[in-house]
Image (spheres, rainbow, N blue to C red):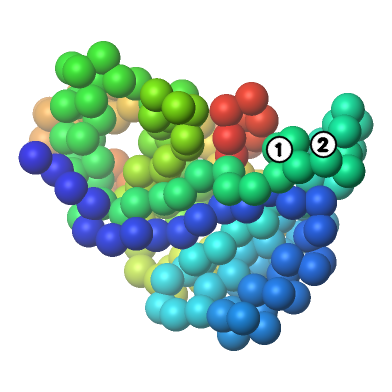
Amino acid sequence: MTKPVKFAHVVYQTRRFDEMIAWYRTVFEAEVVHQNPALAFMTYDDEHHRFAFANLSLLKPDSENPGERGDIGVNHVAYTYADAGALMALYARLKAAGITPYWPVHHGTTLSLYYKDPDGNRMEFQVDCGTVADANAYMASEAFAANPIGVEYDPDRLLEQYEQGAALNELVRLPQGPPSAIPFEHGMT
């Protein structure tokens, strides 16, 4: 059985974007790794990000009840697997059990599969695509600023490549393609 090697991060959706960043900076002594008006990524240790914040005031400004909790709160929790082979083994095992991801996306820093449990709680199963230094450099780059969400990919095709013996570093290479839209109906980043 393939198990995660660590808990990676949690993503919050908020309408108090600046307040949340300030609070996590104070409470966790976290540093901002990347921030734009819509998204912020923070860490307090050697992980490239432990928290991410989605600014609903910008991303969903026309909400029917912007002052109520609604979409505010935990978007998803993330778990890291040892390598792309472990992630593909997990994908194959879950698919055989009738459990499929709602969003396969390569974020540039991670190769990720997003799932929902029976209650609709969202989780990300990911593998890092390089070192933490690589991820930090990418998150500080113009490429990440231009596309902080990533590119969707076909997990069946990636599984096939894995089963045919593709090198693990080939499996985590960022695919070419248009930036992925944020799937608000299911979760995000």
Which callout, 1 or 2, points to the residue nearer the camera?
1
> Which quadrant of the figure contains the N terminus?
top left
Compared with 23, 80 (above or below) is above
Residue 124: image location, x then y, percent: 42, 43
CA separation in Å, label 1 and label 2: 9 Å
For the C terminus, give its image quadrant.
top right
Describe the element under mark 1 as helix, strand or loop: loop
**Along the viewing direction, whichever of 126 and 156 lies nearer the viewer:** 126
Q: Residue at x 56, y 63 (%)?
A: 51
Q: Please indicate whether residue 174 sits to the left or right of residue 21 in the image.
A: left
Could you tell me how many numbered marks the image carries? 2
Name the residue at 64% across, 48% down.
Answer: 73
The numbered disc on residue 121 is none
Please report contact status of discs 1 and 2: CB closer than 8 Å, yes or no: yes
Residue positioned 35% across, 69% down in the render: 131
Picture quadrant of residue 113: top left
Can residue 105 be seen from the camera position used here?
no
Q: Please tell me whether residue 95 is drawn above or below residue 33 in the rendered image.
A: above
In this rendering, the answer to whether 172 lies above or below 152 is below
Label 2 CA crowd tier, 10 Å (few <14, some 14–19, many 20+): some
What residue would you read off at disc 1? 71
Q: Is residue 159 above or below residue 98?
A: below
Give amino acid for label 1: Asp
- In the orientation shown, which residue stands out farthest toward the front? 68
Disc ID at residue 60: 2
Identify which amino acid the numbered label 2 is placed on: Lys
